[in-house]
Each structure stands twice: as structure tokens, then as C-alpha cells.
Amino acid sequence: MNKLIHAARGVFLWVDDRLHLTKLYESTAGHHVPQSSGSWFYVFGSATLLCFMIQIATGILLAMVYVPSAAEAYTTLEYLTFHQYLGWFLRGVHYWGSNFMVGIMLLHMTQVFLFGAYKYPREITWITGVVLMVLTLGLAFTGQVMRFDEDAYWGLGIGVAIMGRVPLLGEQLVNMMLGGPIIASDTLSRFFALHVFVLPGGILALVSIHLRMVLTKGINEYPQPGMLVRRESYDKEYAAIIKKEGVPFFPKAISKDLVAAAVVIIGILACATFFGPKGPLGPPNPLQIDTLPRPDFYFLWIFAIAALMPDWMESVALLGGPVIIGIILFALPFFNGTGEKSWRRRPIAVLTVILTYVSLGLLTYLGHTSPWSPDMNAWRSAHTPKKFLEGRSPLELQGSLVIQSMQCRNCHAIDGIGGQRGPDLADVGARLTKDQLVRQVIQGGGNMPAYGKNLTPDQVDAVVAYMVSLRTPGVAAARDSSQPGRPPME
Amino acid sequence: MIRTILLLVSLFALGGCDWMPGKPNPDSKWREASETSDFAILYRQNCLGCHGIGQVVSGSIAMDNPTYLSVVPREVLLNVISNGVPSTAMPGFSAAVGGTLTGEQIEILTNGILAKKPAAQPSPLPPYAADPGDPARGATVFAASCASCHGNTGDGGEKAGSVINPAYLDLVSNQYLRTVVIAGRPDLGCPDFTARTPGKPLSNEEVADVTAWLISNRRNEFGKPHAPAQPPLP
């Protein structure tokens, strides 16, 4: 037995001598970290990396079935989802893994920001993290394209339209992205290459640098109010912290990361089990207008901004916005690299985070409901509540039918039923006078097309008569304030 | 023994995974609109905006109006759904006229609507279509049967609005006027031909006459009588 142990030790020492495994262990898993960093707030980085590893594993399995060709991608998705044994579950884990990865990455970034971990001497750790965020979002976007359905098609169309606005290079960029001027057979191949080779490769490379920085510059100590970062003294202070209360990352500090990893895995598996994968929705057919495309949740806020901003701001905001955000994020550790780390004494940082989360949350909610998208079927399926038909004259009833047949309901709800892009018509008779309604219908305005050439005078009469009648019982029709003596219905 | 049990349980659990709550239902698979063959879905998606049914009221005649269903011939209903009624708010739904429904779907809609036809029908039933009668006699019929709601001149009363508004009359077909006289809008309080005068249903001639009187009230923008080109039957 002793001989066996002796022989095994010899083999290990030989391997260790050649590969320097002990040194590698001591400088990585065994390196000392501040005891205070063994906190639940410090688990998000490893959890993001775990998600990435899950994505690689499930991505490899998916790639065994998925065919990245415009002609077959949709069919293979349907096969995976509805026919392949547990294919739906695999797709679900990959989909939810992506959601978790983006969400946890955002939490990691927030924690790093609030704990001042981007400050001296961890500038490069922060910058590689920012690039990792961009690559992760790129991975998410290209992954959305892999789910080659109507959402993917239109999402890609919007992304390409933004690229096409880049001055001078727009056309070339679009051609490079799509493999031609339009979304065609080459497009999916390019995005597949990006999704499974280029972006994961880039992430692996940057994660290496990111982790290298974590090892060389150390994990940020849990910030205490009043402990200021000074370039002249921080390195010595950090060394003193490690000397005084340093613990090896493994097995001391890793315990919470392991628990968090278990929670993340259970979370992803549970979401995949109970909610399943997303889509595929309808096929990526540009002729299919009966669709309400939306991006995945992490891009809903951009979807909302693009839909809600005024026309004149679009190019400036869509092209300038990312540049400005990028400059701020890259420059942050340089213009705010020293001083207070604790969020308790950094009210502007806390307000920035709250404002960012509230803005992203509201925009995401709006993106999820997307009230600006017409409901292309409302004209034939959205009925009118009885209270808005009772007591109406035959002409007004005909007006209600013209509103349906001319597809006004695609954009205008009545009492919440129908499209939400334009104002609800339930009380339009109390808001606009008959003259104003005639003008609006004929000339349009405020994002509404002019219908003067599409409606006969009789149809305008009927529509306007009906709309004047749309108001809460007992509420008078809107009056022309320039002619106070004029009865409202004239 | 314990290992065997654990192995069996694991295999059972793995085998059971394929029917978890998140597993997409094959019914949720995206399908071409042309594959829909359920009457209720087709009606809800295509008709409900204008034609109420059950508890839903809409701007035009409900497709479960018993009197309407008693008089409308199947071929007319099929034709109207397929091709619409030109110059009115009723569009055609067949692919041949730019609609989205297949012939089979239009058949399903027609059959589904007619399936709601009541077993007991009023008798005698006026025919669905007929030439307009005498407008002068129609004015008398209107005064006796309709004026209590629509006013003595037809220009609106306390209970109901004008039926001689020129814009209204230009937006509807002659057949629509006749159909409303026969079937009414009971969902909005307008009775059918049997109940306009309690105990005295309108006769075939009276229906034709009052329809003719309504048609005679058409006016152009100068207030002169005019008859817009009428589409062929429906």
C-alpha cells in the first residue's frame, strides 16, 4: 500500500514539476482575498461566468441539431421544440441561461459600481468588464437572431436600420452584417459564426484578462465609509488588509459563490421547466404583417426608446447614445478613480443607479406592452362595448362600422379594446369639437395619416357623427371656444 | 438494492421530464391563419368587430339575429362573406378580392352562422330580397310602425335617430335597408318586422313599401333625390 502511495506521489510530483500545478493553485484558487469580500454581494461575477459556461454547454448541444441556414433554421427550431426528446428543455435552459446571464451581469456591474471596485488600481478590470458587457449583449442579440422567427427577423431589421444610419460607412456596415443589402441566406450564417465563434471567443479571452486582473490586483475589499482610496497609499493599505485578514479564496471565500451557483442553476432549470423556451413564433416572413415583434427583455428598453423618441432625435440618439455611454463607462475609473468607495457616502452614485434602474424598468415595461404598435387585426376583431352603441342613430352606427372597415381600430381603442398607438376614442367627443374631428380625420397629424383621400364625404360625416357621440353619459360634447355661443353639435 | 432503486427513480424522473409544465404544447405551434378551422376562432378574428354575437353587440346586424338567420339564403351569406358588399363597410374576405380567408374557412363561417338559425321561425316570413314597393304607401307604413321611435318624418325621435339622413342612406345598400326593416336590431332595442306593431307583423308588401320609402329619401349634396348605383344582390 505504501509503495502504491509512494508511486502515486512520485507521479504527482513529476506532473507538478512539469505543469507547476501547485504554484498555479496557490496563485489562483489558493490566493488570499480580504475576508470581508466573502460577502453575498460578491457572488455575481462568478455567477455570470457560470451562466456563460452553461450557455457554452447547452449551445454545443443545440448546435448538433440546429441548422444555421435561412431555409432550415426555423424547421430545426420547430423540430427541437416539438419533436426532439427534451429538445424544448435544452432550448429553455439556453434561453433562460441567457436571461440570467444578462441579469446577473447587470447586478455584478451595479455592485462593482456601488462598491467603488472600479477605482484605483482596478481600472483595467472595469474596462474589460465593460467590454465583456458589450460582448454579452452582442451574444444575446445574435442569439435572438438564431431563434430565426418573426421577432428575430424584425429585430435584425431594426438593428440593421440603426447600423445603416452610421455616416459614410452605413451601407458597408449593413452589407457586412447581412452579407448583402437585405436579410438573406448569408445573413444567418454570419450571425451563427458571430454567435458561436467570434463572440464566445472574445468573451473567453477577455474573461481571462478580467480574472487575471482580479488575481493580480486583488478582489476589492468590502468598502467602509471613510476609507478613502489614494493612489499613493492604497497598494500598501490593501497589502496590509490581506496580511491582517486575508483568507485563501478556496475553500474560505468560495462557499458563498458555490451556494449562489447552486441557486443560479436551480433558477435556470426551474425557469426552463416551468416556463419553457421562447418561441419560435411565426416564421421570418416579411410578408407576414400579422405580427407584433418584440426583442427579448434585455433589449426592450432600446425598443421603447426607438419607438418613443421624436423623429429628429433618432440618428443622434441611436448613434450618439452608445458612444456617450461607452465614453462615460470607459472613462469612469479615470475621472473618479480615487476617494470614497462606500455607497453610503456616494449619494450621486446611488442616485445614478436608482435613476438607471427606474428608467430601464419603465422603458422595459413600455417595451413589453409596446402600446405604439398597431394591432393589425383589431379592425375586424375588436368589438365596440355596448354602451358606445346604445342609443346611437343609424348614421352613428354606420360611423362605427366605417371606423372598423377603414382600420381606425388598429390604432385607436374604444374603452381599451383595440390598438393602443393612438388615443382611445372612448371620450373623444368631449375632447374635440366636430370641426376638429373633421380636420383630424381628413388631414391627419400627430403621427396619424391623412384619410381625406380614403374616405367619402358621407363616410367622414358618419365617422365624425359617431365620434362626437363618444363621451361619458352626461358629459357635453366639446365646444368651439372661439365661438362660445355656438351649440356643440353644429 | 438501494442503488437499483435510486437508478430506477433517476431514470423515471428523467423520463418524466418531457412533460413538465414548460413543455410547449403542440397546439401553441405557430400555424398559418389559413389553417384555422374553428368557427368560434374564425368568427372572433374576422367578424366580431362589426357583427355581434351572443352578449357582444357591434355596429351592424348580429349574426345570431334569429329573424335575419331565418330569411337569409345560404348562398347570399356565402357571397357576402366572400366578396363583401361594394360601397358599404362590408369588405370581402376571400383571397380573390384581397381578403385572408380560404374558401373552406368561408364555408365554416357560413355554416357556423346558419347553425344558429332558430328551429321555430315567424310565419309568414317575408322573402330576403324583393323589389322595392310603393314609397307613398311606405310613408304610411312608416308612420304607423316606425315613427314612434324615429319621429314622424323619420328624421329622428326621442328613442331613435334619423333614418333619412342622406349620409346614412348613401352608406347602406337597398338590401341592407330591407334587411333591417325585416330583422331589426333587437340587440339595440329596434324590433323586427313581427314586433314593430304588437300583434300585427308587417306584410310582404309593407316591408317592400317602407323600404321603398327609405330609398326615396336619398338626397345628393344639393338636396335633390338621387339613387346611388346599387350593387347587385346581396
Image (cartoon, rainbow, N blue to C red):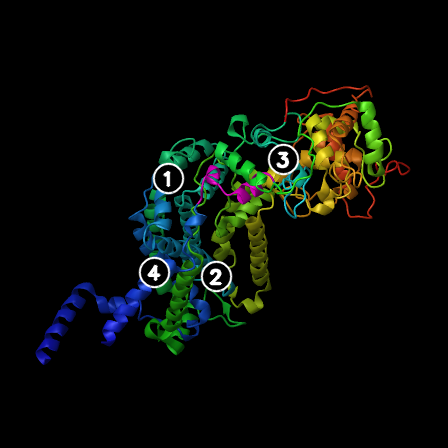
Asked whether, in this view, residue B132 is left or right of residue A70, the answer is right
Which circle, 3 or 1, is nearer the viewer?
Answer: 3
User: CB atoms at circles 3 and 2 under 8 Å apart?
Assistant: no
Mark 3 — on which chain does it sit? Answer: A
* Chain of the residue on which disc 2 is drawn: A
Check disc 3: other Cα within 10 Å, few if <14, some if 14-19, many if 20+.
Answer: some
Which residue is denoted by mark 2 in the rendering?
A107
Which badge, 3 or 1, comes first in the chain's sequence? 1
Mark 2 element type = helix
Q: Any mark on residue A212, and which?
A: 4
Q: Amino acid at mark 2?
A: Leu
Where A193 sits versus A354, above or below?
Answer: above
Which residue sits at x=30%, y=47%?
A65
Q: Amino acid at mark 3?
A: Gln
Examine the rendered structure and indicate whether residue A9 appears above or below residue A441: below
State the CA–CA distance, disc 2 to disc 1: 31 Å
